[in-house]
Image (spheres, rainbow, N blue to C red):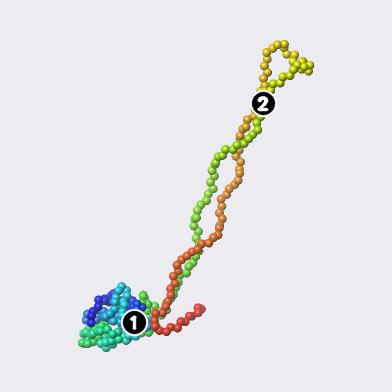
Amino acid sequence: MARNTFTADALFGTTVTDNDGDKIGKVEDVYLDNQSGEPEWVSVKTGLFGSNISLIPLAAADHAGDTLRVPFSKSHVKDAPNHDPGHELSESDEAELYAYYGVGGGTSTTTTTGTTGTTGTTGTTGTAGYEATSTTGRDVTGTVGHDTTTGGAGHDTSGPNTDNAMTRSKEELHVGTERREAGRARLRKYITSETVSRTVPVTHEEVTVTREPITEANRGAALSGGDLTEEEHEVVLTEEHAVAAKETVPVERVQVGKKFVEGTETVQAELREEHIELDGDARVENTTRDRH
């Protein structure tokens, strides 16, 4: 048989897909040729809750990254002849599987080596040429805490073992408010100037000269002085001027305060929700239980 370039370490835990790219399952165990030590078969859990173990040949498989693509349909792999994972492949088991998948194969002289690392007995010519091995060191009889033949405890192929139920969760949005400083306001007083004009009435005195002739009525006053004399007579003239006086008077009182104004804001967030779907070919009856 043509040998491939697969390694057991690289194959464990990889996702197996069929010829249409649909997921079949994840690699549980890798079966090595006892003579060459190269991987020849992988086991995958199929059926409802992984209750069936199917072997797939690596002869025509393609391994890239975390995906192992095989040239068979998912249903064809599921219906493959069953094999007890606790025992090596017998010559008849091997021939039956090769015939089922339609690929060539052969036998070789082997020694049986368990996955616990102990050395077994030497086989005879024509006996099985493969052993089941696991880099996790678990026993291929399935004693890792889950049943490989019944649908009791489930096996989480992505991590640790669980029971036969999954918990579905989703994110919920809770909104509220928080108070933070938005700004500050203060009162500040400053002085400006402007020119103001006002019109004020004012008065002033002017000299007037009145001449009147001598009459009998004023003759006595006119002759009361000397005959011919020199004299002066003076009057004081006054006038009004506009003056300005400033006075500071209160005009108004200004206070600063706060008030609450209500409004609305829209909050957006991306919420994630888990969904659970059944990956299998069996008929399923959905049952919803009421909460108590």
Residue 264 visible to the viewer: yes
Residue 116 appears at what percent x and percent y?
A: 27, 80
Residue 30 visible to the viewer: no
The answer to whether 136 is drawn above or below residue 81 in the figure is: above
Residue underneath mark 2: 205
Residue underneath mark 1: 73
Quadrant where the N terminus lies?
Answer: bottom left
The answer to whether 253 is drawn above or below residue 240 in the figure is: below
Q: Residue at x 32, y 85 (%)?
A: 80
Give the secondary structure at mark 2. loop
Where residue 8 sits, quadrant-wise, is: bottom left
Amino acid, disc 1: Ser
Residue 256 appears at what percent x and percent y?
A: 56, 50
The answer to whether 260 is drawn above or below residue 55 in the figure is: above
Q: Residue at x 57, y 49 (%)?
A: 255
First along the sequence among labels 2 and 1: 1
Give the secondary structure at mark 1. loop
Task: Report crowding for label 2: few under 14, some 14 to 19, many 20 or more residues within 10 A (C-alpha).
Answer: few
Q: Residue at x 61, y 41 (%)?
A: 249
Q: Is residue 214 left or right of residue 97?
A: right
Amino acid, disc 2: Glu
Where residue 54 sits, quadrant-wise, is: bottom left
Q: Is residue 244 left or right of residue 53?
A: right
| In the image, farthest residue toward the right | 216
- Closer-to-camera residue (37/198): 198
Residue 126 appears at what percent x and percent y?
A: 22, 87
Residue 17 appears at what percent x and percent y?
A: 33, 78
